Image (cartoon, rainbow, N blue to C red):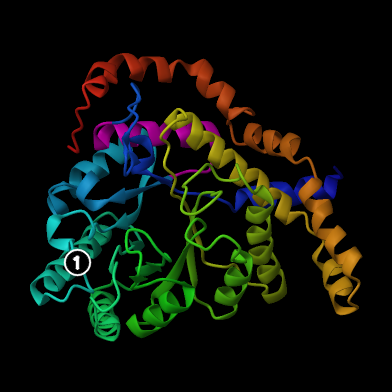
Amino acid sequence: MTSRQHDIVFRALDSFSIETPSWGYANTGTRFGKFLQPGAAGTTEEKFADAGQVHRFTGCAPTVALHVLWDLPEGLASAALVEEMAARHGVRPGSINPNVFQDQLYRHGSLGNPDATVRRAAAAHIQESIEIARRLRSRDISLWFADGSNFPGTANIRHRRQWFLENLQAAHFRLGPEQRLLVEYKPFEPAFYHTDIADWGMALLLARGAGPRAKVLVDTGHHYQTQNIEQIVAWLLAEGMLGGFHFNDRRYADDDLTLGSIDPYQVFRIFHEILLFEWETGTRADIAYMVDQSHNLKPKIEEMIQTVATAQELYAKAALVEHEKLAAFQKRAHLIDAEECLKAAFASDVRPAVAEWRKSKGVAPDPLRAFRDSGYQARVEAERGERNRAGVTSYA
C-alpha cells in the first residue's frame, strides 16, 4: 500500500462510526425458540457494559441503539438511569426504536390497524419515544412496522396507507429541530400477503409525506433475493432521502447474519456508492450506520466486534476506489477498466493500515484477540450464567 493509500484509509476511518444494537447483546432467537448463552446481557446495564467493550476494542462504535420497551421499560422515567449507565460504560444512547409490534393489541397492526383506538396507542408510543430521544439527546427515531395482512381481502390497503401517512405526519410535528424520523421497509414477514411498507419506494413516499426531517432507513436484509441494494442506495442519495442503514447479511431472506459473512462485495459496493456520491458532490452524506443482527449462535460480543471490524475494513476498501479514473472509464464506456478499478480497491489488503489506525487511537490492533485476552467474557459468563441457564431475563 502506498503512503497516499495509507493516508486515504486513515481519513476514511477517522470519519466512520457504526452503532451497535442493545438487543444484539441479549438472548434472542427465531420464531422457533432461543439458544441461551451464559454470558448474554439480561439487563439494560449489562447491554451498555457489553457495548462499551465493543467500542473499547474497535474505537468506532460509540453509540447504542435502544428499544424502548426492552431498554426503557418505564418510558421517559427510565431516561435518567440510561444516561447514567451510558456514562459508566463509555458509550452514548443512539437511535431510539419504538416497539409497535410486540404487544397483543398489535395483532392486526399498529398505525395501519383498522381499530382507531390501537392506532392512537401506537401513535402515542411513537410520540413518547420522540420525547425519550430528546431527553437522551438522540437524533434518530427509527421506525419499523410489522403491519400488513396475510390473506387477500382482509385489509383495505389504501385506508391503511392513509392512516400511516396521517400518523407519521403527527410524529414529525413532534420532532425537535435536530431530530429525524427514519422509516424502514420490509417486503414480508410477519405479514405474508401484503406489508404496509414493503419497499424503498413506499418508505420514500411516506417519509416525504411525513415532513422534511423524515428519511428512509435501509436494512440490508430486507430485500428480495436478487435486488440491487446499491442501486436503491444510489437513488435515495440522489433524492436526498437516505437516512441510515441497519447492516446485516443474508443468504435467503431476513437472516440477520454477520455483516459481510455471505457477500462482503455487496457491502463494499454500498459503501462505494456513498463515497462516490460524496466525491462527486463535495458534500458529506448524513447517514447513520447501524448494526441489526441476531447473534443466536456466535458469542455475542465477539460477533459484534467481528461485525464492526469488518465494516471498518470494507469502508476503508471503498475509500480506495480511484474516483477520477473510474469516472473517466465510465464516460468512455471502458467496461473492463471500470470494473477492474472497483475490483482493485476491493482486493486491497487494508488490514495492516486499519491496525495502524487503531494503534494511533490507542486501540488494540487486533480487537478480537485483545477482547479474548481481557478475560471479560469469562467473567460475565460466571456472573450471568446461572440466570441465563434458567432463562430469566430482566429489562431493568
Query: Is the magenta region chiefly helix, strand or loop?
Result: helix
Q: Residue at x 63, y 54 (%)?
A: 267
Q: Which quadrant, please, contains the C terminus?
A: top left
Q: Nearer the viewer, residue 155 or 55?
A: 155
Residues in magenta?
Answer: 42-62
**Relative horizontal placement of residue 274, taking residue 194 as reference (left or right):** right
Provide residue 69's location: percent of width, then percent of height. 20, 50
Residue 280 falls in which quadrant of the image?
bottom right
Does the magenta segment cover residue 261?
no
From the viewer's perspective, is residue 49 above or below residue 31? Answer: above
Q: Residue at x 19, y 28 (%)?
A: 392
Q: How many marks?
A: 1
Instruction: Tell me if mark 1 has few (under 14), some (14-19) or many (20+) residues whose alpha carbon lies within 10 angstroms of its own.
Output: many
Q: Nearer the viewer, residue 179 or 341?
A: 341
Provide residue 80's location: percent of width, then percent of height. 19, 46
Residue 167 falls in which quadrant of the image?
bottom left
Provide residue 210's location: percent of width, then percent of height. 33, 81
Would you name the residue on which mark 1 appears?
A: 108
Residue kind at label 1, given as amino acid type:
His
**Relative horizontal placement of residue 290, taking residue 267 as reference (left or right):** left
Provide residue 4's location: percent of width, then percent of height. 83, 50
* Label 1: element kind: loop
